[in-house]
Image (tube, grey):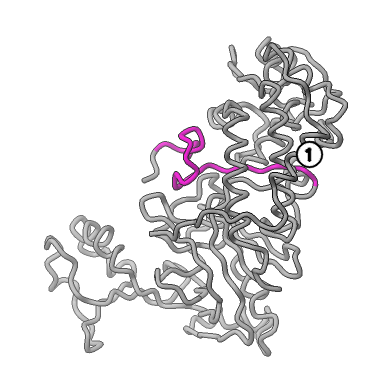
Amino acid sequence: MTKEFPNATRKAFSRRHFMAAAAGVIALPKLASAQTAVQELINAPGRGNWDDQFDAVTSRSQAAVTSNQPILGPNAPMNLMQAIAEYQRIVSNGGWPEVHPNVPLQFGVNDPSVRQLRQRLIVSGDLPQSAGMSDSYDSYVQGAVRHFQARHGLSETGFIDEYTLKALNVGARVRLAQLETNLSRVEDLGSDLGQRYVLVNIPAAYAEAVENNAVALRNVAIVGRPSRPTPLLDSKIFEIIFNPPWTVPRSIIQKDIMPLMQKDPNYLTDQKIRLYDNKGQEVDPMTIDWNAEKAPNLTFRQDPGPNSAMASTKINFHNKYAVYMHDTPSQSLFNDVVRFESSGCVRIENVRDLDVWLLKNTPGWDRQKIEETIHSGISTPVNLADQVPNHFVYITAWSAKDGIVQFRDDIYNLDGAPELALQTTSGIE
């Protein structure tokens, strides 16, 4: 299914030493009451630049959170260590308060539960201390909520929906443990990923094209559902196929196509999926018993075209899981917050931008040539002049050098805390 993360081996630069040093600089005395601890955190002179400043009237939450730093850049372990030190300080002083709304929390509301929300957001650095304490859900709170939502991969609505409330009420101690878990993962992955590489972070459901330690492209992705997870792997992209035919994996034939053919005998014909025997001869689907226990031992292949499962592009890299990256005709799915819908492969939004970036060193394959080839409808494989490293990783918490910490749901339940499991939907298998 997925490869295991090995136990982290401690590096020459001990993070324990870092934590001890950091604690000596910013640790605060433990306070008796949680409420007092919250106020102490809010008013602490040692907060430095942890508060992230932004225009509360015209929200720039996504711009403030988005960075051209890659998740696994050379400073990733240090950035996580700094985040861990800050969260240790928060935990040692009582954490943050839970938010229990009396009314729907949105712009214009005036309610005592907004005060809880303000305290919560100030402690985590989403709301500037200068916004103060009141019962008013004003533009400062709205902007802070959007900032919080952006950091957690949620829809930036600016109001407290069910999923934002769940994320708000994950305790600081749980978030600290999540950061520590992911520091071990980042350390184990190392920093030698290549001068140019593609990284897919599965829980974040996006892909980064990285060059010279900066993100050249960041593309929204759709990854495997929990019942059919996208595997962790390291490989090299060696080929792009434009207008690819799709050979249907056996698992999809058995789990999906067999039941569909039982309901609709014209399904394969409508989807332009042809059947071939081991001699390459086409087989009429009407001759198959679709109620049999096992799928027929035939090759199922969908013709190329804009409505095929892979649409314009298939990106190939060597791996034992038979997965790849590809385009999709279902572009509307990229607008979903929950993008864990595939059978293991990774669908890439705006994949032609990634095609151009991958082929930049391959003579004769500029964007115009790529577009002409796709428009032709002819299946065309192209070998990359220089193979590009490709990494599928599982990182649910990370931090950039500006101190902005990001968290994502633990979609495959690898972090070990039920509070971190998939929050943004209840029906994904």
Measuring from the top left, give residue 335's x and y in whole percent: 56, 49
Residue at image x 78%, y 39%?
Answer: 22
- From what the image shows, is residue 366 above or below residue 113? below
In this rendering, position of residue 416 left or right of residue 108 = left
**Residue nearest the observer in this picture, 356 or 64:** 64
User: Could you tell me if residue 54 is visible in this image?
Assistant: no
Q: Pointer 1: what residue? A: 22
Q: Look at the image and tell me whether residue 425 can be seen.
A: yes
Q: Residue at x 67, y 15 (%)?
A: 34
Q: Residue at x 76, y 32 (%)?
A: 125
The number of discs equals: 1
Question: Which stretch appears magenta?
Answer: 402-426
Type of amino acid at the residue the image marks with label 1:
Ala
Locate residue 387, reporting x and y percent. Answer: 60, 81
**Image quadrant in which the N terminus is located:** bottom left
For label 1, the crowd category at 10 Å Cα-Cα, with few meaning under 14, some 14 to 19 and many 20 or more, is: some
Q: Is residue 422 covered in magenta?
A: yes
Q: Position of residue 242 (x, y in %)?
A: 52, 79
Q: Secondary structure at mark 1?
A: helix
